[in-house]
Image (spheres, rainbow, N blue to C red):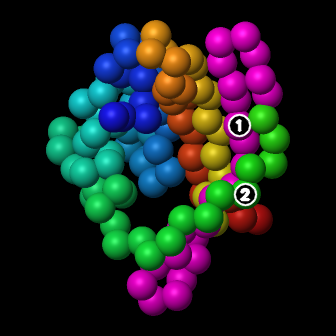
Amino acid sequence: GSRAGYASGFDVLFKPTKAAEQAIRLTETEAASYMVTGCVPEDKGFAITPFTDVRFDNKGTLLLSDSATAMGEYYFADAGDGITKVEYTFQYRRAADGSLKIVVHHSSIPYKK
């Protein structure tokens, strides 16, 4: 099933890593556009990029009664041995079936001076 909370009836706030013209996505259609291309012209299909590995480095987690928030960095490896470091914040909420669903997804490329 989907990791995002749309099918569980949750509102989802999504700030994709490589989005500029429409940096915030508030609908499932807009989020799917970023992942596989679609309704937003700038989208190139992040989820279909041929990454060879993804490594998470979770820096901290806040646990609440029906939600959890995690923050850290993840590293995407490409076929040419390049690594892209991305910073993330995810908030998860417990769905009726007990699974955790993402309701906030904020990813960004680190700031460079």
Q: Quadrant of residue 31?
A: top left
The magenta-colored residue range is 62-84
Tag of residue 70: 1
Magenta-colored segment: predominant secondary structure:
strand
Q: Is residue 53 left or right of residue 48?
A: right
94 left or right of 78 in image: right
Q: Residue at x 57, y 38 (%)?
A: 106
Give the residue at x 47% y 44%: 16
Front-most of residues 43 and 50 = 50
Q: Quadrant of residue 18?
A: bottom left
The residue positioned 35% from the left and 56% from the top of the image is 47
Q: Position of residue 87 (x, y in %)?
A: 66, 52
Q: Which residue is mark 2?
A: 57
Q: Residue furthest front?
A: 97
Q: Amino acid at mark 2?
A: Asp
In the displayed image of the protein, which residue is found farthest to the bottom?
80
